[in-house]
Image (spheres, coloured by chain):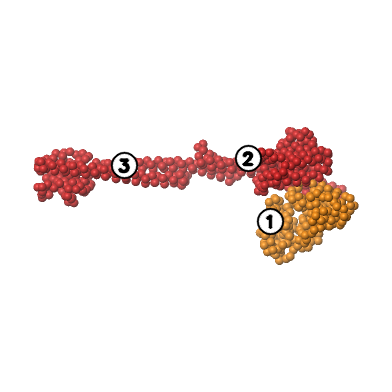
Amino acid sequence: MKILLIEDDRETGKYIVKGLNENGYTVDYAAEGKDGLYLAMNNSYDLIIMDRMLPGIDGLSIIKMLRSVRKKTPILILSALGDVDEKVEGLKAGGDDYLTKPYAFSELLARIEALLRRGNEIPEQALQVGNLKMNLENYTVTRGGRKIELKPREFRLLEYLMRHKGHIVTRTMLLENVWDYNFDPQTNVIDVHISRLRSKIDKDFGKELIKTVRGVGYKIEQ
Amino acid sequence: MDIRSSSRIKSLLHTTAIRLSLKYSLIYIFIFGIIFLFLYWFINSFVQAQIKASLTQESKKIESIYHVKGIGAIKEYITTHRQYSGEDHRFYLLIDKNGKPQAGDLKKWPSEIKTNGSITNVWIPKKEIVDAIKDGDGYWPVITINFKNGYKMLIAQGIRGTEDLRETMFAIMALIFGIIVVLIIALGFSLGKNVLWHIENINKAYNAIMNGNLSIRIKTSSKNDEFDMIANQINEMLDKIEQLVTEAKQATNNIAHDLRKPLNRLRNRLEISIIDKNRHDCNKILEKTVADIDDIIKTFNAILEIAQAESAAAKKAWNNVNISGITSEVAGLYRPLAEDKSIELNVNIADKITIEGNERLITQSIGNILDNAIKYTPKNGTIDVCLKENEKSIEVLVSDSGPGVNEKDYSRITKRFVRLDSSRHTPGNGLGLSLVEAAAKLHNADLVFADNRPGLSVRLIFKKPSI
């Protein structure tokens, strides 16, 4: 997997490149907008990570330029501007995800994985992890053939986890995508919802499918 | 005159008031001029007609004297009349067949005179008048008489009277013009001075504000004229700006202060771990540090959110918000949390209520209130969440059966980082209700605490716009 990182702070850039390399990604790094634009135009990447505030050409302009020449590479925007409005603006310009600085590297990694997988997602009628099956046509969930009753929100939570099976999803990602909330509740309510879900799909089946990744989030895998 | 006052006069001359008054005085002078010309023409023609009538009458009189008494009587008539001199003195001249003057006030017969019996204006220079009579050069209305014996006679009307009348009229006209101009210019100057006074005050305030002194206001007069009205409006705007700037400054200061504490704690922990000789697991310390920093970031975000809610920027994302939907969703989000503590969560939400506002902040506010309620309500307690509407307001009510809050602390619990002694052991950063308060203020809503006997009831009351 090849990633292009455009980030004007070289220290941060180095740190992200190192982290991504350790996780098996090949990374091209550009510290300036126009270098980044040149690389993005002339190479093929699986993902672009873009700082929003860049000297010279700013991040949003680059995104707009890339989108105008039909470059469909997924773009993750990094920004110190955490306002919801700013976020909406970034996504409107053609960004695929938006992460506010400061962020945890694990959060960045989880979002990169989610974005990379999004490209080759095929519309599925059924999701499966081990013997846990989700039917998206009639909204039923079974494990080992046994039907599990889920509330609508629990269903959406499980669906999100299953769509990202084998990959970490963070609490923020869950809040944003399952609840549409752009803020952190004071208490970690997500943990409680997950434990609810666990009690329904894992409790009586011996093998635990939903796993806690300490300090980061959750992942579902066999 | 020093430069200052001359430049003052110059700027006075540049004021609209002065310019307008000068313009108007010109227009008035023009109009009065036309009126006077008409008046003059009218009086003049009236006088001329009178002169004509009197000359014709006089000529008839003389002709009748001639018929009755002959030329000798006419000579005598002229001679006796010569003695008379006054404003409306008539002049006579009688000449014989050869044109030689026989009697009268003129030295010779004017050459350009017509003798057809009509009245004509004839130029008569002063030097041709016999000395005893005082009158000037001018066109004199003249009538002539041709006698049968070849004698000719002229009667001229003295112009002194009409000249005087004309002069008096011009003098009155000039005086009135002068008074108009002086009055209008004086008015213009006083208006201009008033304008300049106001402008100077605006300038002073402008300069002071540009130099960073936001507390300066524009001085107003007691006249309450249009300038005072504008100045008052600008002053009100400045009040608002000053308030916003002060608030923004305060928010920034608070953020800096608020973060010092957790940063200090973090620093201490790191320092202690450096001097701690027994440290075994470097990774563990680092992990703990990262968790600490995450906490700081969380706090930082919370402070930023409050600051944002306190600023007008949060009004950018102003929408029609389905508060019924929001409240039930938030209740849904927290329900498992309540159930874990065996708290009975009663939700009673009126349908389809909407308000104008910032959806995220309202959601977060209701969430924070509910979060607190669950946190402080003991096991097997009860929490009620209500949304109701009446004619005047829309009210979100969250009441719990927890230990409640002492009435004297109601005003304290919304302050940043304030955590009552009874809640020291629970997790939280003491910013939850601060955000609720900021959001309430932004929405012009009231945040009301009350005793729920037992427990605390929190009401968020959104006022409906009065139609």
Protein chain holding label 3 = B
Q: Amino acid at mark 2?
A: Ser
Q: Are marks 1 and 3 in contact (CB under 8 Å)?
A: no
The residue carrying pointer 1 sits among few (fewer than 14), some (14 to 19) or many (20 or more) residues within 10 Å by Cα, namely few
Chain B colour is: red
Q: Amino acid at mark 3?
A: Ala
Protein chain holding label 2 = B
Residue bearing mark 1: A92
| Residue B237 sits in quarter | top right
What is the number of the mark on residue B171? 3
Q: Are marks 2 and 3 in contact (CB under 8 Å)?
A: no
Give the foreground label among 1 and 3: 1
Question: In the structure shown, which secondary structural element does the residue marked by tag 3 occupy?
Answer: helix
Dots 1 and 3 on the same chain: no
Query: Disc 1 and disc 2: Cα gap in Å?
Result: 37 Å
Residue bearing mark 2: B466
Chain A colour is: orange
Which is nearer the eye, B397 or B215? B397
Q: Residue at x 20, y 40 (%)?
A: B89
Give the foreground label among 1 and 2: 2
Q: Residue at x 10, y 50 (%)?
A: B98
Question: In the structure shown, which secondary structural element does the residue marked by tag 1 occupy?
Answer: helix
